Every structure is written in C-alpha cells, then in structure tokens.
Amino acid sequence: MEKKFRADIYFGSQISDLVSNFSKYGLIVMEYPALSLVDYNNYYNELNNYTARGGFLFIGGKLVGAPSGQDINGIKFREILGQSPQQRTAIINKSDLHLGLPIGENMIFNEYLYASNDTPPMLGPDNPFPAENFTSIAIFNQSSDAAVAKWQYGNGTIYFFSDFNAIYKIN
C-alpha cells in the first residue's frame, strides 16, 4: 500500500510520530484509532488544529478506546454498548462529491459507532472553531444516528465512518 498510494503508515503506538508529521499531509485516514485516553488528551489540540488549518481527516471506527462521548473537531463520537457486535444496516440518504455513494443504497456495519452534532460550541484555545455543516450521509435504520457523516472545522473537512469494513449492498 505504501508504494501504490505513496502513503506513510503509522500504527496506534506511533501516534506521536504521526502528529509530529501532520504538516506533510493534506489527507489523513485513521482506521479504528482507539486512542488511549492519555493520547487523546495529549494530542487533542493537534488533531483539532490539523483540520482547522485545512486538512482532510477520515476517521473510521472508534476514536478513543474508552467509553464513548469524546469529541474531536467539534463533534462527539459515540458507541451503543451491547449492540456493536451485531451487523447494523444504514441507508445512504445524502450524496457527497468525494464519496460517490448512491442515495437509497444500504451499507452494513459491524459496529454501532456514530457521530453526533450535540457538542456545544465551547470556543476557546483548545477548540477555536465550531463544527459546521454537519451532514449525515448514511444513517442507521434503527435510529437516526449518523453511520457516515461529514462536517467542516475551521478550513478543514472531516469524514466519519462507523467502520471501514462496511459491506455495500446494491438494492
């Protein structure tokens, strides 16, 4: 993958290396980062600042390995406990230029992780921008929770996927 996409690959224990190299990247994909609370707290500002300065951030899966409710870039990341092992169906309800997912089609996720725009805009030095233009691109059928979402933070854009290992089904 490194040669095909000219990508640098970092593993969970290398979060400090990734953060120190943020300036090299216009796009960062974090697949199931499950950051420790210590790393989340240590790099919270850097993650917010990367996006605020114009970076593209894709997050798939659990942001923090602790209980849900942590925020990043102005949006909360949540998990429905006791339901994650089951496959959960979501329907694509909005189009997006970069994703190309057709409205009305289904995606099946192995986890019930979702993003919610219920973070109050507590602006300050740690969080200088509000999340704007939050869009649920796909929602879980059993609720209105965002299985795939997009929003702006400062000059950047964030995409969230409940799980990158989703199954895409054409109706």
Image (spheres, rainbow, N blue to C red):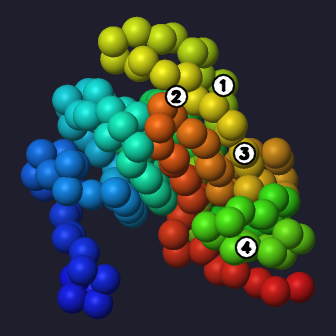
- Would you call the spot at circle 4 few (<14 residues within 10 Å), some (14-19), or many (20 or more)? some
Give the residue type that dot 3 points to. Answer: Thr
Residue 121 is situated, as x and y percent measured from the top left of the image, at 57, 15
The front one of 128 and 137 is 128
The earlier-in-sequence mark between 1 and 2 is: 2
Residue at numbered disc 2: 74
The answer to whether the residue labelled 1 contacts the one labelled 4, judged by CB atoms less than 8 Å apart, is: no
Disc nearer the start of the sequence (3/4):
4
Whole-percent x and y of residue 82?
A: 61, 49
Three-letter amino acid code of the residue under disc 2: Gly
Give the CA distance from mark 3 to mark 2: 13 Å
Element marked by disc 2: loop
> Which residue is tagged 3?
135
Q: Which residue corresponds to the image point at 20% horizontal and 56% vertical from the top-left?
A: 24
At mark 4, the secondary structure is loop
Which label was assigned to residue 101?
4
Type of amino acid at the residue the image marks with label 1? Asp
Left or right placement of residue 83 versus residue 44 in this view? right
| 21 is higher (above) or lower (below) than 53 | below
Front label number (1 vs 2) = 2
| Relative image position of residue 35 (x, y in whole percent) | 29, 45
Q: Are marks 3 and 4 in contact (CB under 8 Å)?
A: no
Identify the image quadrant of the N terminus.
bottom left
> What's the mark number on residue 118?
1
- Labels 3 and 2: the sequence-earlier one: 2
Q: Front-most of 42 and 108?
A: 42
The reply to whether residue 66 is visible in this rendering is no
